[in-house]
């Protein structure tokens, strides 16, 4: 354990007001970089966020032999130099991206090794859907202690039914089916905007992808794909989070760069609580005279997304009345709640389903629902970030609290937010980084 660690020191200043521009989404950019591996010529992805996940993915691509050039958020990937089939073990646990590289590597070099996937500790996050789909398409896969070894002479189309509309598994299937021999029919595929964005990029590269009603994708494999260019659409998680920054402090934030259609459920949910909006073709701003409680459950798109859950719970702490949040996508996404409670939030956690859907995690010991008694004042304290989205909720709570909050574990936030300190400072928040003694539990 090191003696000192970086912290974000937040001093609340009252209502946050102003403009924030979000860049392309963290959860689309990395997938586009991986899809570029499939082309026979370079691809150019623009409006990329300046986030750790882009750097990690770039390093992984380079370790495979691809040439990657990032010029102020415009990333060119030259896949023609790809020569290595093994993602080095040093990338183990860093993010969820290596598993997505298996299909493209099998197409390009006939074999693949990827280290075990990481990402936030928000549930078991298995990769069985990915592995089963790859096996159905003809990959020979073994799981070792270090990662996943795969081989395939020629991948073939298959009929795959996902037990749950997994974002990542849908992306694995799309990126594998596009160059496989014959037709793949995917039932139960994810329809998140970032997945559709990837499908459209693959179509731009020459893939034959049809989208049918009822979560069905039909993909006819082609012999080759060319590189393509794409400007990424705005990050709806960041956009929502900055709208909450305005609302939780009684201010008003205008977010540019994320279109209304990506925020439709966020806007309707917040409207139901009393928020008011000004929406244009290029921006969304939100403010409220007062906000009332709500009962919200997370869901697949177009439902209320799981990544909006923690900022919303932070907002609930400052709304009048009892609010409920039921998490249905991950089984362990309330790890940030105890820290909010130490700040004074009145929140109770339950492992019963306080919503309309049956729980997917029956018997899980971790809570899937919280009830928030809104209106309790928050006080600044020292908190350790458990995962990326929970960490941002701390910043939001800190902005609405009395006194200073010291937030450590901010490396989670660096992985997925584009220049958050600058953005918050632009909105008027007093926020700075400092070295502080490493708290227990943060190695
Ligand atoms: N699942 C399985 N087996 C699998 C794959 C998924 O059981 O093989 C389960 C998961 O455990 C989870 C559910 O299916 O309960 C949904 O997981 P999904 O595969 O959709 O999630 P993901 O692809 O791993 C992406 C985002 C997440 C986002 C979810 C849901 C990336 C890199 N991550 O994860 O983003 O919450 O989709 O929209 O795209 C974040 O940005 O903070 C984040 C966690």
Image: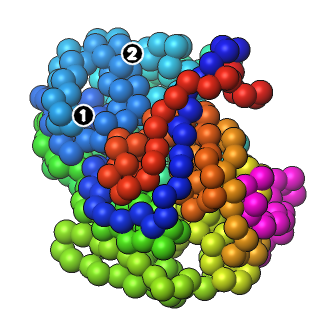
- Labels 2, 1: front one: 1
Q: Which mark is residue 12?
A: none
The answer to which of 364 and 71 lies nearer the viewer is 71
Q: Which residue corresponds to the image point at 68% horizontal and 23% vertical from the top-left?
A: 438
Q: Main secondary structure of the magenta part?
A: loop
Residues shaded magenta: 342-368
Q: Are marks 2 and 1 in contact (CB under 8 Å)?
A: no
Give the residue number, with chain letter if any, for mark 2: 85
- Compared to residue 11, the image places residue 373 above or below, namely below
Give coordinates of residue 84: x percent, y percent.
35, 11
Q: Quadrant of residue 260?
A: bottom left
Residue 361 visible here: no
- Is 277 left or right of 298, judged from the image as shown? left
Give the residue number, with chain letter if any, for mark 1: 36
Give coordinates of residue 439: x percent, y percent.
72, 28
Give coordinates of residue 201: x percent, y percent.
22, 49
Q: Quadrant of the N terminus?
A: top right
Q: Secondary structure at mark 1?
A: helix
Q: Residues within 10 Å of mark 2 (few under 14, many from 20)?
A: many
- Is 150 left or right of 380, judged from the image as shown? left
Residue 288 visible here: yes
Q: Earlier in the sequence, mark 2 or mark 1?
A: 1
Q: Which residue corresponds to the image point at 41% horizontal and 78% vertical from the top-left?
A: 287
Q: Quadrant of the C terminus?
A: top right
The answer to which of 20 and 417 lies nearer the viewer is 20
Q: CA distance from mark 2 to mark 1?
A: 15 Å
Q: Quadrant of residue 420?
A: top left
Q: Which residue corresponds to the image point at 46% horizontal and 82% vertical from the top-left?
A: 288
Say if the magenta span includes residue 367: yes
Q: Which residue corresponds to the image point at 34% horizontal and 44% vertical from the top-left?
A: 422
Q: Secondary structure at mark 2?
A: loop
């Amino acid at each position: 354990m090191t003696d000192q660690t970086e912290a974000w020191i937040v001093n609340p200043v009252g209502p946050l007001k102003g403009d924030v521009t979000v860049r392309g989404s963290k959860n689309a950019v990395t997938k586009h970089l991986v899809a570029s591996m499939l082309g026979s010529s370079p691809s150019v992805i623009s409006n990329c966020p300046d986030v750790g996940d882009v750097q990690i993915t770039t390093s992984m691509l380079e370790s495979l032999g691809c040439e990657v050039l990032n010029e102020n958020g415009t990333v060119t990937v030259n896949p023609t130099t790809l020569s290595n089939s093994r993602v080095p073990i040093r990338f183990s646990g860093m993010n969820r991206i290596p598993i997505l590289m298996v299909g493209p590597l099998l197409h390009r070099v006939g074999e693949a090794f990827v280290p075990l996937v990481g990402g936030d500790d928000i549930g078991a996050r298995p990769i069985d859907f990915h592995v089963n789909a790859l096996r159905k398409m003809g990959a020979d896969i073994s799981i070792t202690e270090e990662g996943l070894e795969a081989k395939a002479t020629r991948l073939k189309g298959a009929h795959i039914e996902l037990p749950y509309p997994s974002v990542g598994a849908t992306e694995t299937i799309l990126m594998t089916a596009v160059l496989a021999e014959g037709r793949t029919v995917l039932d139960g595929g994810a329809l998140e905007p970032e997945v559709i964005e990837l499908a459209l990029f693959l179509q731009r590269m020459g893939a034959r992808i049809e989208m049918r009603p009822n979560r069905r994708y039909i993909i006819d494999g082609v012999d080759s794909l060319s590189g393509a260019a794409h400007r990424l659409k705005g990050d709806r998680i960041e956009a929502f989070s900055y709208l909450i920054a305005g609302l939780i402090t009684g201010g008003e934030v205008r977010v540019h760069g994320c279109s209304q259609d990506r925020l439709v459920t966020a806007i309707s949910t917040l409207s139901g609580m009393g928020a008011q909006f000004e929406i244009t073709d290029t921006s969304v701003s939100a403010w409220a005279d007062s906000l009332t409680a709500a009962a919200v459950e997370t869901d697949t798109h177009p439902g209320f997304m799981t990544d909006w859950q923690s900022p919303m719970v932070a907002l609930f702490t400052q709304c009048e009345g009892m609010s409920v949040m039921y998490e249905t996508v991950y089984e362990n996404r309330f790890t940030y709640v105890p820290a909010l409670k130490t700040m004074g939030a009145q929140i109770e956690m339950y492992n019963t389903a306080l919503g309309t859907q049956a729980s997917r995690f029956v018997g899980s010991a971790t809570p899937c629902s919280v009830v928030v008694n809104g209106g309790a004042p928050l006080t600044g304290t020292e908190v350790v970030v458990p995962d990326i989205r929970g960490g941002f909720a701390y910043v939001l709570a800190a902005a609405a609290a009395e006194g200073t909050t010291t937030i450590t574990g901010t490396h989670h936030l660096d992985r997925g937010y584009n220049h958050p300190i600058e953005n918050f400072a632009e909105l008027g928040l007093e926020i700075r980084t400092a070295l502080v003694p490493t708290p227990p539990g943060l190695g």
